[in-house]
Amino acid sequence: MIIRVRQVAATCALGAALTACTAAPEAPRAARPAPSAPAAPSRPPTLAPGPAGLTPVFENGPRTHGKTVALTFDADMTADQGPRAAAGERFDNPRLIAALRTLKVPATVFMTGRWAEEYPAQARSIGRDPLFEVANHSYSHYAFTRDCYGLPTVSRDRMRADVERAYAAFRKAGVPDARPYFRFPGGCYDRESLKALTPAGVTAVQWDVVSGDAFATDADAVARQVLDGVRPGSVVVMHCTRSAAPATERAVRRIVPELRAEGYRFVKVSELIGASGGRR
């Protein structure tokens, strides 16, 4: 750091001749501080465990911390849908992701491990974009309870392994820091599944606004359902699957400007969880 010479004002005596005012000598240079070590990345906020140490469940953020809303998108693909993808069915939705980028909307993508394996370049692109965060939607997209929308069921002794296998698939695809958040396939869970996932250290993330975009073709109806349901701190569930949710991109293009006009700010799930102060 260069220290400027400080000019000292002196009173010049009047006499037979004027005496010159002189500057004070340059102050010694301050020692350059040693470079500090880079700060360790902070862990994303999570909720405290629930009763009996069960996996905590998060549904929405605080209602009194301003008009924030989190759009979340499930990138669904079950473990046995490979043949359908090979036959041309599209379980991705690049135009939706492009729309979110154009609109500059932060979002949380709950991704299955099988989806990341099918679309590794897209998984990597989403995971490395600071606009988004990737969270866990299981590897297989099999249900963690019985009678969950006709989904196949993963056995209780395989639940934790299914979640960890998804994280492994994310790492292999190049997603650098998937969040410790988990969304149950179909949103179906019970006490036994919460107990099975306790060692995984995740926060289960549900929602308080259902978009109704699954298998919908009317984008305006989807948008209206979201706009009518959003409150401060809301978590909206939508889908990032072209074949199963073909109207989502068009709905988002209406939802975003209307909510912004109402004063809402879009955030990721991690910000809502952080604002909750670790409380359910």
Image: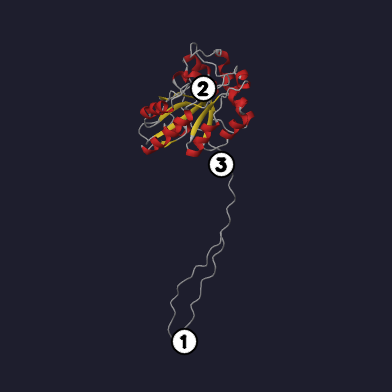
- State the CA–CA distance, disc 3 to disc 2: 43 Å
Mark 1 residue crowding within 10 angstroms, few (<14) / some (14–19) / many (20+): few
x and y, in percent, of residue 164 in the image:
59, 23
Q: Which residue is mark 1?
A: 17
Rendered-image quadrant of the C terminus: top left
Q: Is residue 127 left or right of residue 70?
A: right
Q: Secondary structure at mark 3?
A: loop
Q: Quadrant of residue 60?
A: top left
Query: Does 114 sit above or below residue 252?
Result: above
Q: Quadrant of residue 228?
A: top left
x and y, in percent, of residue 171 in the image:
62, 29
Q: Residue at x 53, y 28 (%)?
A: 135
Q: Secondary structure at mark 2?
A: loop
Residue type of the residue flagged with mark 2: Ala
Mark 2 residue crowding within 10 angstroms, few (<14) / some (14–19) / many (20+): some
Q: Residue at x 62, y 25 (%)?
A: 118
Q: Nearer the viewer, mark 1 or mark 3?
A: 3
Front in this rendered view, residue 16 or 172 = 172
Q: Is residue 6 left or right of residue 87?
A: left
- Is residue 52 visible in this depiction of the protein? yes
Q: Nearer the viewer, mark 1 or mark 2?
A: 2
- State the CA–CA distance, disc 1 to disc 2: 96 Å
- Is residue 43 visible in this depiction of the protein? no
Q: Residue at x 57, y 13 (%)?
A: 157
x and y, in percent, of residue 204 in the image:
48, 23
Q: Which residue is mark 3?
A: 39
Q: Is residue 91 left or right of residue 231?
A: right
Residue type of the residue flagged with mark 3: Ala
Front in this rendered view, residue 138 or 71 = 71
Q: Which residue is mark 2?
A: 244
- State the CA–CA distance, disc 1 to disc 3: 62 Å
Say which label, 3 or 2, has the lower sequence index: 3
